[in-house]
Image (cartoon, helix red, strand yellow):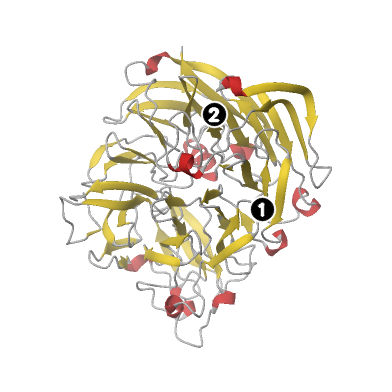
Amino acid sequence: MLGKIRLVSSLLIAIALNSSLQAQSQTQIDFRPLTQEMLNDPDPEDWLMWRGGYNNWGYSPLDQINRENVDQLRLAWSWSFAPSALGSNGMQVEPTVYDGIMYIRHSDEKYSAHNAATGDLIWQYSRPLPTEIAAGDTRLTVHRGRGVFIYEDKLISHATDGTLFALNPSTGALLWESVMTDFRSGAQPSGAPVAFGGSVVVPYNCTAWTAADPCHMSAYDADNGDLLWRWYTSPTAQDPMHSTWGDEPQIYPLQRRRNMSPWMTPAVDSERGLFIFGVGSSAPQQPQLAGTNGEWPDRLYQGSTVALDHRTGALVWWAQHHSDMWNDDSVYDRILVDAKLNPSAPNSLGQNPDIDPDQTRELVIGSFSKDAIFYVYDRTDGGFLYARPTAYQNVIRSYDGATGAYTTEPDAIMTAEEGREATICRENRQIPQGAYSPLTNAYYVPAFNGPCSVMSMRSTEPTIETGYNTTYSATVPSPAAQLGQPEAIDVTTGKSLWRLDRETPLYGMLTTGGGLLFAADTNRRFHAIDQWTGETLWQTILNGASDMAPISFAVDGRQFVAVIAPSGTQAAAQHAGQLGLSSLTGLHNVGHTMFVYALH
């Protein structure tokens, strides 16, 4: 591992295509290409991508650190990053670790490679942005990238200006770059890229108040960045589901439909070659404005999980979870699991009547949306299996067990009346990641009971100025007694292994082969928790709230756990304010620190 790093010079400046794009290097990595076979079956010592692997488990099989010895965990090294640049909320990244080297995207268009055992810098690459973005003249969220991806002999990432590019993992030198979109369109790359079978997909954010054009998930050639295919997140006229946007002539034909952003990293069904991901809310939000009744299926593909063929971008299946009238944003955890099902979930929202309890099913599971409802679907065809609530929500009444059709709570329906108000309780999770453990067959959800919002309609037509054409006129407390409500859910039954009623939420989660769940909270505490019981076995104090999931990796047989603080999302800052805590968050525009722990 570490023997694969060799000294070459005190300073190597690699200039490629543009003299302002520089990689500074103290050492050069003797890099082994990362093949598709290695990505399909990762070495347990590596953390190769967002959530660790294609199945999005957020699980490391390493077990050197376990329930018996976790109290001996100590800081091994740390690394401080420069403050986030103007327009950034902070780091929302998961580092990548391969062959003893950590690769990380910073929150100021810098990228670096480090000795994963010591943190020592190997190389750093810096990428300038167009003047309009750097000066804050756009409405883009700058430096929004949640990771990098290594494919064969390239380190692939994207920039705020809509450029996809590849670096040499050995030196940080630029290999190629390709313009995906013009940043002036208001669309921007968002989630970490993921590559499979030579196709690199880049999650995009086409926010209703910046982007006027239809949104898309697109794939690019891993060899040179050339566009391979583009799938629009709203159906074209050739798609039979085009009719879910109303009768012809449609009030909102494709070119007028906005948002529906696929802005988080897909899971990959490597057996079938599918990218599986969620699609966020649409503008307009009110079905009535589009000439529909809001009943399933409504204005696809907002509020849905979709599966695309990695070679062509063809839609293989879809499943819609709600008609999103509230910016419920169904883009979070899609986790691929094989398990038997015998659901007897508390407060079930719906269950398929034809489940065979003796059959092992291929599933996609998770709390997909801000409402934190837990879903289980068949990933072979998108068939509905069961759903149950976690934190308090008042937007979904039930699901038809046979079809998966939703019934919306009547009081939550946003009609197209000016002045229409509804109290919506669905702020129960955000970007911080849930996780799955094969040890317990449980899904761990970082749920919380955020304040309910009084939503009102402010115009009858969404524009760039009005965004979703709705606004929040007030907030009211959730009926739930506590803010934090993390839970472990048995996938087979839907029952709770445990639920913690906490003052402070737990955020992004990591499970390990040592039987531990690692997660941090709003009050700077970083916890190691027993996966079976929810008991905290170890904790330490960080320099601020921490909300992105930790990762685990090993170098020469020694296991490490890494976490970044302070936080990078708005939720942690909101919760700190709500609880009256002085914890630093990424919104304070302070530098982040990576803390890396190992057994003493």
What's the residue at 66%, 53% (across, down)?
A: 224
Q: Which residue of the protein is positioned furthest toward the bottom in this rendering?
A: 249
Residue on which disc 1 sits: 224
Task: Please state which of residues 109 and 453 is positioned toward the viewer in this rendering.
Answer: 109
Considering the numbered disc 2 on the image, is that residue within a helix, a strand or a loop? loop
Q: Is residue 64 above or below residue 445?
A: above
What's the residue at 29%, 40% (across, down)?
A: 442
* Residue 543 in sight in this render: no
Q: CA distance from mark 2 to mark 1?
A: 24 Å
- Image quadrant holding the N terminus, namely top right
Residue 464: percent from the left, percent from the top? 64, 67
Q: Is residue 481 left or right of residue 571?
A: left
Residue 342: percent from the left, percent from the top? 17, 50
Residue 381: percent from the left, percent from the top? 33, 62
Q: Which mark is residue 405?
A: none
Residue 37: percent from the left, percent from the top? 46, 42
* Residue 575 in sight in this render: yes
Considering the numbered disc 1 on the image, is that residue within a helix, a strand or a loop? loop
Residue on which disc 2 sits: 99
Q: Residue 169 lies in what quarter of the image?
A: top right
Q: Type of residue at label 1?
A: Asn
Q: Which residue of the protein is positioned furthest toward the top in this rendering?
A: 600
- Mark 2 or 1, nearer chain start: 2
Q: Is residue 274 left or right of residue 385?
A: right
Q: Type of residue at label 2?
A: Asp
